Amino acid sequence: MKRALFPGSFDPITLGHTDIINRGLALFDEIIIAVGINSQKKYMFSLEQRMAFIEAIYKDEPKIKVASYGGLTVDFCQSVDAEFILRGLRNPADFEFEKAIAHTNRTLSEIETVFILTAAKTSFISSSIVREIMQHNGDYTTLVPPEVRP
Ligand code: ADP
């Protein structure tokens, strides 16, 4: 069973995230979408809300599970028996950041990080841009799945 963890803040989940998840389904038997709990971060959506959006989107997809976690990603991978971490890459800045994390995780564990390059049409989307538009009552509906509503 090839099980991958897709970790992130998902504040909120966007069409960029779902593009990576949907394409990851061709590679893995199960993907656990792991919503991070970080006491240092200020979120727009509560943990419950962030998880509820994802659960609604994937309610008919048995290969997707939703979980929350704090602490080290590799420790959570081990606790749910996931051998892979799935991440999306949008641009060189993502690459540099992700490279350091993937190397670090590799020194801490045997877990392999698998990167999927974002689709051109969703590569500009970020949760922070979506939050900005929501805060100013703009039209964010083309950037997120229909289940995501403030
Ligand atoms: P984090 O707090 O870890 O940055 P995010 O929720 O922002 O969490 O992102 C989780 C993962 O989704 C990361 O691998 C990130 O690169 C990827 N991702 C975010 N936005 C996009 C996008 N538009 N296209 C592809 N991947 C994306």
Image (cartoon, rainbow, N blue to C red):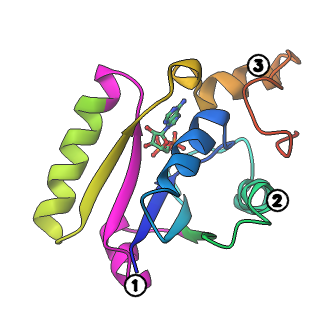
Q: Nearer the viewer, residue 83 or 41?
A: 83
Q: CA distance from mark 1 to mark 2?
A: 25 Å
Looking at the image, is 73 positioned above or below residue 146?
below
Magenta part of the protein: which range?
A: 69-94
Q: Nearer the viewer, residue 98 or 47?
A: 98
Amino acid type shown at disc 1: Ser
Q: Which dot, 1 or 3, sits closer to the camera?
A: 1
Of the image marks 1 and 3, the number of the one nearer the N terminus: 1
User: Residue 53 location in percent, x, y?
Assistant: 78, 54
The image quadrant of residue 66 is: bottom right
Report helix, strand or loop for mark 2: helix
Query: Badge 2 is on which residue?
Result: 56
Residue 9, visible in the rendered structure: no
Left or right of residue 140: residue 137? right
Which label is found at residue 133?
3
Q: Is the distance from the Cβ of mark 1 to the nearest ligand 1 atom less than 8 Å?
A: no
Left or right of residue 30: residue 18? right
Q: Which dot, 3 or 2, sits closer to the camera?
A: 2
In this view, the residue farthest toward the left is 107
Report helix, strand or loop for mark 1: helix
Report helix, strand or loop for mark 3: helix
User: Residue 79 location in percent, x, y?
Assistant: 40, 84
Amino acid type shown at disc 2: Ala
Q: Is residue 89 magenta?
A: yes
- Quadrant where the C terminus is found in the figure: top right
User: Residue 90 location in percent, x, y?
Assistant: 42, 26
Which label is found at residue 79?
1
**Structural crowding at the residue carrying mark 2, measured as other residues with C-alpha within 10 Å and reported as few (<14), some (14–19) or many (≥20):** few
Left or right of residue 53: residue 71? left
Amino acid type shown at disc 3: Ile
